Image (spheres, rainbow, N blue to C red):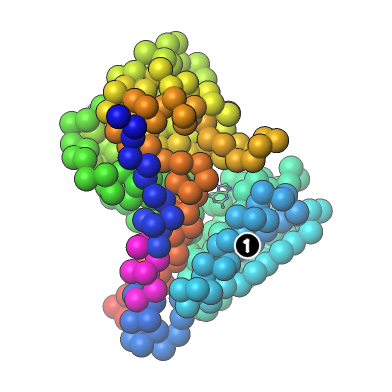
Amino acid sequence: MSAIIIDGKAIANTVCQRVEKQVKEFKQQIGREPGLAVIQVGEDPASQIYVCNKRVRCRELGILSFALDLPANTTEADLLALVEKLNCDPQVDGILVQLPLPKQISADKIIRAIDPGKDVDGFHPYNMGSLFIGNPRLVPCTPLGIMELIYSTGVDIKGKKAVIVGRSNIVGKPITMLLLQEHATVTLCHSRTQDLAAECRTADILVVAVGQKFCVPGDWIKPQAIVIDVGMNRDESGLCGDVAFQQAKERAAFITPVPGGVGPTTIAMLMSNTLKAAQLREGRKQA
Ligand code: GUN
């Protein structure tokens, strides 16, 4: 029997409806909208699409969107000065610097400069560290979205074997922590893993975030697994994921499509994080 296709767009819309309602309540109580500043340096075409989608979603939900587009030759000092200015701007609750950055700018330095309370990407060492000690504050959006996709299946995560492929700071490491918090037994695999096929074949929950077209073939999928494909690979025929979808869906119980799986939920969780940052900031002020 073919897998159920997890509808990321529908799940994202449900999250956004909740955020929209809470944004209205926030505005009534506090007298202003939550604000998100999205900075893009240069003109990477994929980044331009992501950034545009983020700004459109903000406007749909009543979140103030500050668009800051800087030229590709921006210096690290200039970007640091902009981040500092936004850290102090009372209208700005969230600051997102779209990655990757041009090579003259250290992403690590920029991320460390963002006020952790405005770090809606959850990439600052304070937020990463909070997640790793089991006391999450602002958590990275893609892993948060993946958890929504897994929750939507109704499958109990506790005690399940989860296998993650890809050890990035944006996806692999934080999703490991979120699944651990839900009491899964988690294995984090990467390019040096000795027998990746054997690891994947043990996975009740398989999350693949590598960025290589079809690097997980269908026969690596454990029958009845949940498969989350984070890949976004462009080729002649359009977008495709990291998992060989057509074969994998014949073995899995649930699988995400590309596009229409993880992507929409990432943006929805960014909206949710912006609202959360605004609520935390105002709570602190009132206290
Ligand atoms: N580039 C790819 N994914 C992301 C993300 O989640 N946040 C930012 N800031 N840049 C990205």
User: Between 211 and 250, which is closer to the camera in this rendering?
Assistant: 250
Q: In the rendered image, is residue 271 in sight?
A: yes
What secondary structure is the stretch in magenta mostly built from?
helix
Q: Quadrant of the N terminus?
A: top left
Residue at figure coordinates x 35%, y 63% from the top left: 14
Q: Quadrant of residue 22?
A: bottom left
Q: Which residues are magenta?
A: 14-21
User: Between 63 and 100, which is closer to the camera in this rendering?
Assistant: 63
In this rendering, the count of numbered labels is: 1
Label 1 residue near ligand 1, CB within 8 Å: no
Q: In the rendered image, is residue 141 in sight?
A: no
Q: Quadrant of residue 197?
A: top left
How far from the left and from the top, in percent, is residue 11? 36, 56
User: Between 246 and 79, which is closer to the camera in this rendering?
Assistant: 246
Q: Looking at the picture, does residue 35 appear above or below residue 4?
A: below
How far from the left and from the top, in percent, is residue 103? 74, 42
58 drawn magenta: no
Relative placement, left or right, of 157 versus 59 is left
Q: Residues within 10 Å of mark 1 (few under 14, many from 20)?
A: few
User: Between 255 and 95, which is closer to the camera in this rendering?
Assistant: 255
How far from the left and from the top, in percent, is residue 66? 61, 72
Q: Kindly give the residue lying farthest to the top in the view shown.
A: 194
Determine which residue is flagged by label 1.
52
Q: Quadrant of the C terminus?
A: bottom left
Residue at figure coordinates x 52%, y 67% from the top left: 57
Relative placement, left or right, of 83 versus 225 is right
Q: As shown in the figure, which amino acid type bears the numbered disc 1?
A: Cys
Residue at figure coordinates x 36%, y 88% from the top left: 28
Q: Kindly give the residue lying farthest to the right in the view shown.
A: 73
Label 1: element kind:
helix
Residue at figure coordinates x 68%, y 56% from the top left: 48
